[in-house]
Amino acid sequence: MGTITNEELIKRIEGQFPGQVTVLGEPYGLLTMETTREQIIDVLSWLKNDAALQFIFLTDLTAIHYPDQEKSMAVVYHLHSLVNNVRLRLKVFLTIDDVHILTATTVWDAANWMEREAYDFFGVIFDGHPDLRRILNVDDMEAFPLRKEHPLEDPNRVDKKDYFFGR
Amino acid sequence: MSDIQLVEAPPGVEGAGFFATTLDKAIGVARSNSLWPLPFATSCCGIEFMATMASTYDLARFGAERLSFSPRQADLLMVMGTIAKKMGPVLRQVYLQMAEPRWVIAVGACATSGGIFDTYSVLQGIDQVIPVDVYVPGCPPRPEAIIDGFMNIQKLVQTESLRRRSEPKYQELLASYGIQ
Amino acid sequence: MKNHPVYTDNDPQNELSTLNLGPTHPATHGVFQNVLQLDGERIVSGVSTIGYIHRAFEKIAEHRPFYQITPLTDRLNYCSSPINNMGWHMTVEKLLGIKTPKRVDYLRVIIMELARISDHLICNSVLGVDTGAFTGFLYLMVYREHIYEIYEEVCGARLTTNMGRIGGFERNFNVIAFNKLRKFLKEYPVALKEFEALLTRNRIFIDRTKGVAAVTPEEALNYSWSGPLLRACGVDYDVRAMEPYSSYEDFDFEVPVGSTGDVYDRFLVRNEEMWQSLRLIEQALVKLENEPSDVFHADVPDFYLPPKEEVYNNMEALIYHFKIVMGEVPTPVSEVYHAVEGANGELGFYLVNEGGRAPYRLHFRRPSFINYAMYAPMSKGMLLSDAIINMSSLNIIAGELDA
């Protein structure tokens, strides 16, 4: 129920960044677009500063690991325009050997801790981040736990008998 | 006549102006009814502890009026809530700073055994790092259950021998945790 | 402190002292650590460390079916767990395209507003405790027990409620629950007025909290603040008003907004929200009289477990039960983001589904985590006692901070 429809959003964004953003769909009314990692900071800062759109609120920044895809790491940004009451989701896909992306802390300070969490869980490296280190897990952990290959349970437990757990 | 219940005196010989009993019984009564807890509240069980300390379930009736957040002045370490692996060394440090005699009560499923969080980041029970006296199950345990655990600690304190802390069995237990 | 970064190098004669506001907190606020550098009483810089109660909810959620994730969401903001439960159920209902009947929506509004009252009650009374006024906390905790009794009538548990199911509730609200609710609505306003009389115009409280930690709306939006903190700064962003869910558009309520964003404004905004919540509950009780009183869940046999008597006697119910529990019901391959107004701010659930019975990825947009990021930059230049009051007014719940 925003004052800007999704079609108009697509028109404006594609008008500003022709050929560099693709529309992935509108699942449940939320416009989802994909862009490249070279363009993402320009897109985000244009969306924030444009007088008509004013996406000033960074709702969420997270990552998803798709090990079966060729570009297996997706960084997902959720934006919200409070004035127009419309949300937008942006995705950037990265390959697992080269998970570098520019930091969004130049646009919003809120991205600082959100990017640290994405680094902690997935290992996505945000270039230019002032303090990229682990935030929730122990500092000397080496693996990235939310990647699909990392197990949920602690593998070093000696007191769990597999027989009782159906294994 | 009010129905305030006072603690019963231990069995002993009474006379005009004197009361004789054994030292450990007298100290047991005194200690168990004036325990100073250290609420190590990390998560949801901490909120149930707040409800236990509030007026409906008043833990202060049992002598635990004065909460101590400094381990140096506390008798009873009440660990309430999930202890993650990051928090384990902190918990151990707090336990080491407590002076003898000290007791530990593990409140809630997470402190007892890791609870519903069987993950890489949660310590599966605080008895991996410190010795525990009483375990209170529940997720979170009702305040009545926490009081029941506290009363069990009181029973332990009351019946403990004065020499228990210097016995070899106790020293072995501490050594198995790496505590001198 | 070997892993902490350098705070300030403007200290050639080593005059600054380091204080560890450590993970064991003497005010049951939760486990998070701030290492502060102090120049006397004034904070020069600080570094926050969190993660002392990281329980890997998002990883666990990838291994649990939708209905088993509800107990996980309980333990996010455990002071107001029904809001988390309802938010999660609404997210799944949005994914599956389930529309709940109006009566379920109104019952959900009642429960969520009760949860909001219980969270703001703790936050404000503990703010009083931190300034030294212990009486307010003691007198108001009794009402939290009354709210717990209402929860017990509905779902059986006090704190971590696991309330509701996908599509509605597990049982209808009985007469005792409604009687307790009406009694609460009669008694609580009296207590809240007393609490306000104790603190709101209290000279000492005003001196402690007015002008402390004022935040401009631009700074707050830059750090993605939401909830009572953002509203105290002057921005009227409330998810219930902007994107109404669960029939909030049928209700008439105001969104209280402050002006300076300091601790006193946050206290006032939370108090006023409690009054608005009471108004919402009264309106919901009136609206419930016009709805059929035996409806307590949507008619979705594919996702809502049938009653046990039917499972044992009726073949269809048995098959539905089997399919739901074993996860044989196909779910849409899509992604959904749903936000509710939690007690601390916008609580969002980002659910990416690949058709199984467990999510492919579930991310919680946790307001405490995002609100707390500003704490260390904000405390530069503050007195230590003001920083403590500031932390208390941010209402950081450790479960939601670390997840």
Image (tube, coloured by chain):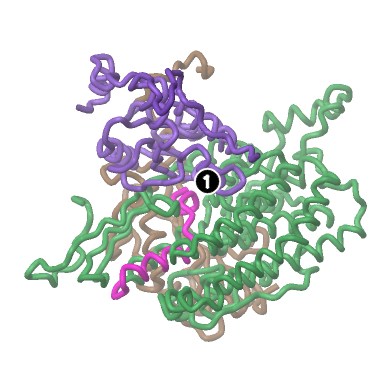
Q: In the displayed structure, would residue B31 be above or below residue B53?
A: above
Q: Colour of chain C?
A: green
Tell me which amino acid carries mark 1. Answer: Met
Residue B164 falls left or right of residue C395 = left
Element class at badge 1: helix
Residue C172 falls left or right of residue B114 = right
Residue C192 falls left or right of residue C76 = right
Please tell me which residue is depicted at 34% across the width and 40% down the height of the picture. Answer: B74
Q: Quadrant of residue C227?
A: bottom right
Residue located beneath label 1 in the image:
B53
Q: Colour of chain A?
A: brown
The one of B46 and B103 positioned closer to us in this rendering: B103
Point out the stretch of residues depicted in magenta.
C380-403
Q: Position of residue C33 (x, y in %)?
A: 33, 54
Please tell me which residue is depicted at 63% across the width and 58% down the height of the picture. Answer: C338
Q: Colour of chain B?
A: purple
Residue projecting furthest to the bottom: A51
**Disc 1: CA contacts within 10 A as few (<14), some (14-19) or many (>=20):** many
Please tell me which residue is depicted at 70% across the width and 75% down the height of the picture. Answer: C254
The one of A144 and C85 positioned closer to us in this rendering: C85
Please tell me which residue is depicted at 66% across the width and 75% down the height of the picture. Answer: C255
